[in-house]
C-alpha cells in the first residue's frame, strides 16, 4: 500500500520538476508578452509582470520600423520554401523510385554535403555572389536556400518514398502515367505530411538566418527580419537605461507572429517529422 | 536502347537542375576556399596574388586569433556538454511520466520557445543580462547582493560564462524530442524484463536506456563539435567579440578579417583550418563512439 502511495508521490514530484523546467524555458517569451503592451511609464514601474490597460502606441511604432524587412522575409521564405520543397521531393522521388546508372554514387554526392562544415565555403560564397552581381539582392538568399534544401530534403524524402508499396506506382504505370505524372499524381500526394515538415523547417531556417544575410544584404531596404531586429536593438539601445524596451519587445513579438501561426497549424507535422526522421548517427 | 538506359536519361534530366544548383552553391564555394587560402586579394586592382603558405604562417603570429582559441574551446566543450546532457535529462524525465496525455503536452510545450526567432531569443537574454534593469541584476538587488551586480556581457570576467548560460535551463527545442524518439523506440519487452530484474529508476537509465540511445548521443556530440567550431552568432548579435577581445572566437575573427578588413585570402585560410579541425573531430568521434 505505502509502495503505491510512494510511487504516486514520485509521479507528482516528477511532473512538478518538468513543469518548472517548462516554465523557466518559457519565461523569456512571457517577458516579451508582458512588456510589449506597456507604455514607458508603466514599464518604469512594472517590468516583470503583466499590467493593464494595454498600450499599443509602441506596437505601431515598431511595426513602422520593421514592416519592410518583415515583407522581405515573407517573400524570401515563400519562394525558398516552394522551390526547395519541390526540388527535394523531385529528387527524393527519382532516387527512391527510378532505376538508373550511377544512382548510388550520385546519392552519396548529395548526402556527403551534410557532413561538410559550412565555414570553408562562406567567404567564396560571398565572392561568387559578388561576381554574379547578387550582392545586396534577396535573390542571393533565395537561390542559396532553394539549392541548399535538397541536401537534407532528398535524404528525408528518399527513405520515405522508398517505403511506399510498389503496387501504387505500378497501378499508375498501367494507367499510362509517364514518369513525371507518377511523381505529381502519386509521389507528391502520399508524401504531403513529410513535405509539410520540410516546408516548416525551410521557413524556420529563413527566419533564423543571420550570418549569410549580414554578409550579403548591405542596404536597409533589403534587410530581412534578423538584420532589422539586430539593427533596431542597436538604434533604440546603446544608452543603457534609456532603451525603449516596450518598443523593442513589440518588434520581437511582431517578428514572431508568422512562426506562431506556423507552429499553430503545423506543429503536429513538425514533431512527427523530427521524431520519425530518426536523427542519430 | 535498353529500358534502363531510357530511364537513366530521364532520371538525369530530372536531377539536372538539382545537381547544377548543388555544384554552384554547395561544391564550388568550399573547393574555391581551398584555393583562396593560398592567395591574397588586392582591393585596389581587384587582383589575386599567390602567396604560398604565408596566410598560414601569419596565423601563428596573430595574437588575437591565438587568444581566441581558448574562448572557442570553452564555448565548444561547455556548449557540447550542455547540449548533450540537458535535453537527455529532460527527455528521461518526460519518459518516466506515466500519464500519456501529459507526456504529449510536455513534448509540445518543449517546442513552444521555437516560435520566437533565434535572434529574438538572443536579444531577450541581452535584456536579462542588462547591467541596469536586467532580470539578473534586479534579482540580485532584491536579495541584497548588490555587489554582485554587473554588466554580464560587458564584463570580461563573466562574458564567456554568460554566453554559455544563455538559454538556461536548456530544456526547450528539438533536443529532448530527438532523445525521446530514441527512448520510445526501446521495445516494451526490454523495459518490462528490466523491471522484473529490479532495474528501476536511475539503474535502468544507465543500464538500458543510455546504451540504446548512443546513436542520438553521438548525433549531439558531432553536431556540438561542428557547430562549436564554426558558430559566431552570439558574437555577431551581442558582444562583437568583446569587451576587448574577451569573447572573440576564430570564426568571428575570420568574419571580421574578410568583411571588415577585406583580407579575403587570410580569412579563407582561417576558414580552411577550422574546416579541417571540424572534419577531424567528426571523424574521431564517429570512430570512437560505437553505435549500431
Image (cartoon, coloured by chain):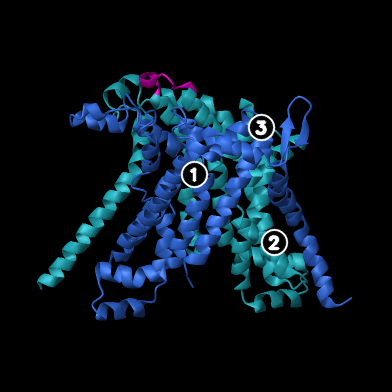
Chain colours: A cyan, B blue
N-terminal-most mark, 2 or 1: 2
Q: Quadrant of residue A248?
A: top left
Q: CA distance from mark 3 to mark 1?
A: 38 Å
- On whether disc 2 and disc 1 are found on a single subunit, the reply is yes
Indicate the secondary structure of the residue bearing disc 3: loop
Residue at 33 percent across and 64 percent down: it is B95
Instruction: Quickly name the residue at label 3.
Output: B263
User: Where is residue A146 drawn, in percent x and y?
Assistant: 67, 49
Q: Residue at x 63, y 33 (%)?
A: B258
Q: Is residue B198 above or below residue A210?
A: below
Which chain hosts label 3? B
Q: Are marks 2 and 3 in contact (CB under 8 Å)?
A: no
Between marks 2 and 3, how big is the CA–CA gap? 32 Å
| Residue B13 picture location, percent across and down | 80, 61
Q: Marks 2 and 1: which is nearer the front?
A: 2
Q: Are marks 2 and 1 in contact (CB under 8 Å)?
A: no
Magenta span of residues: A235-244
The residue tagged 1 is: A259
| Residue sitting farthest toward the right | B1
Say the numbered circle drawn on residue A113.
none
Secondary structure predominantly adopted by residues drawn in magenta: loop
Say which residue appears at 18% left-offset and 32% top-offset: B143
The crowding category of the residue bearing disc 2, from other C-alpha atoms within 10 Å (few below 14, some 14 to 19, many at least 20), is: some
The residue beneath circle 2 is A109
Residue A213: where, in percent of width, then height? 61, 36
Choose between B125 and B57: the one closer to the eye.
B57
Q: Which structural element holds mark 1?
A: helix
Nearer to us in this view, B201 or B59? B59
Amino acid at each position: 500500500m505505502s509502495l503505491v502511495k510512494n510511487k504516486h508521490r514520485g509521479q507528482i514530484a516528477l511532473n512538478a520538476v518538468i513543469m518548472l523546467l517548462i516554465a523557466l524555458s518559457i519565461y523569456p517569451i512571457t517577458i516579451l508578452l508582458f512588456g510589449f503592451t506597456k507604455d514607458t511609464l508603466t514599464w518604469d514601474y512594472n517590468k516583470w509582470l503583466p499590467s493593464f490597460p494595454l498600450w499599443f502606441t509602441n506596437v505601431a511604432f515598431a511595426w513602422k520600423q520593421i514592416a519592410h524587412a518583415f515583407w522581405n522575409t515573407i517573400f524570401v521564405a515563400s519562394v525558398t520554401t516552394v522551390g526547395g520543397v519541390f526540388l527535394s521531393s523531385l529528387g527524393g522521388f527519382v532516387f527512391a523510385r527510378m532505376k538508373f546508372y550511377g544512382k548510388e554514387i550520385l546519392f552519396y554526392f548529395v548526402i556527403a554535403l551534410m557532413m561538410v562544415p559550412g565555414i570553408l565555403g562562406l567567404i567564396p560564397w560571398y565572392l561568387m555572389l559578388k561576381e554574379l552581381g547578387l550582392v545586396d539582392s534577396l535573390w542571393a538568399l533565395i537561390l542559396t536556400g532553394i539549392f541548399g534544401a535538397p541536401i537534407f530534403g532528398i535524404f528525408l524524402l528518399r527513405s520515405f518514398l522508398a517505403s511506399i508499396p510498389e503496387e501504387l506506382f505500378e497501378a499508375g504505370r498501367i494507367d499510362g502515367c509517364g514518369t513525371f505524372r507518377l511523381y505529381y499524381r502519386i509521389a507528391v500526394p502520399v508524401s504531403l505530411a513529410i513535405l509539410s515538415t520540410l516546408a516548416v523547417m525551410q521557413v524556420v531556417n529563413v527566419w533564423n538566418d543571420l550570418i549569410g544575410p549580414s554578409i550579403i544584404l548591405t542596404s536597409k531596404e533589403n534587410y530581412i527580419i534578423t538584420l532589422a531586429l539586430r539593427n533596431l536593438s542597436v538604434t533604440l539601445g546603446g544608452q543603457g537605461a534609456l532603451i525603449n524596451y516596450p518598443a523593442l519587445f513589440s518588434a520581437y513579438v511582431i517578428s514572431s507572429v508568422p512562426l506562431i501561426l506556423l507552429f499553430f497549424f503545423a506543429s503536429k507535422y513538425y514533431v512527427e517529422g523530427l521524431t520519425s526522421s530518426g536523427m542519430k548517427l | 536502347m535498353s529500358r534502363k538506359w531510357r530511364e537513366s536519361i530521364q532520371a538525369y534530366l530530372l536531377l539536372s537542375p538539382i545537381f547544377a544548383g548543388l555544384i554552384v552553391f554547395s561544391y564550388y564555394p568550399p573547393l574555391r576556399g581551398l584555393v583562396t587560402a593560398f592567395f591574397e586579394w588586392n582591393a585596389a586592382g581587384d587582383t589575386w596574388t599567390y602567396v604560398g603558405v604565408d596566410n598560414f604562417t601569419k596565423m601563428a603570429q596573430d595574437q588575437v586569433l591565438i587568444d581566441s582559441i581558448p574562448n572557442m574551446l570553452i564555448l565548444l566543450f561547455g556548449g557540447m556538454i550542455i547540449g548533450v546532457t540537458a535535453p537527455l535529462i529532460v527527455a528521461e524525465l518526460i519518459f518516466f511520466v506515466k500519464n500519456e496525455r501529459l507526456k504529449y503536452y510536455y513534448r509540445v510545450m518543449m517546442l513552444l520557445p521555437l516560435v520566437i526567432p533565434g535572434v529574438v531569443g538572443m536579444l531577450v537574454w541581452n535584456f536579462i543580462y542588462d547591467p541596469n534593469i536586467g532580470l539578473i541584476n534586479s534579482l540580485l538587488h532584491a536579495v541584497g547582493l548588490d555587489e554582485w551586480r554587473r554588466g554580464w556581457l560587458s564584463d570580461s570576467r563573466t562574458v564567456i560564462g554568460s554566453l554559455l548560460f544563455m538559454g538556461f535551463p536548456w530544456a526547450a527545442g528539438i533536443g529532448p524530442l530527438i532523445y525521446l524518439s530514441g527512448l520510445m523506440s526501446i521495445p516494451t519487452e526490454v523495459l518490462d524484463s528490466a523491471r522484473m530484474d529490479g532495474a528501476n529508476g536511475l539503474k535502468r537509465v544507465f543500464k538500458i536506456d543510455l546504451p540504446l540511445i548512443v546513436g542520438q548521443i553521438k548525433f549531439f556530440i558531432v553536431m556540438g563539435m561542428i557547430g562549436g567550431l564554426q558558430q559566431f552568432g552570439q558574437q555577431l548579435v551581442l558582444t562583437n567579440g568583446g569587451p576587448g577581445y574577451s569573447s572573440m572566437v576564430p570564426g568571428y575573427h575570420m568574419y571580421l578579417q574578410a568583411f571588415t578588413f577585406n583580407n579575403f585570402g587570410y580569412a579563407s585560410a582561417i576558414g580552411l583550418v577550422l574546416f579541417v579541425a571540424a572534419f577531424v573531430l567528426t571523424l574521431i568521434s564517429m570512430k570512437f563512439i560505437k553505435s549500431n
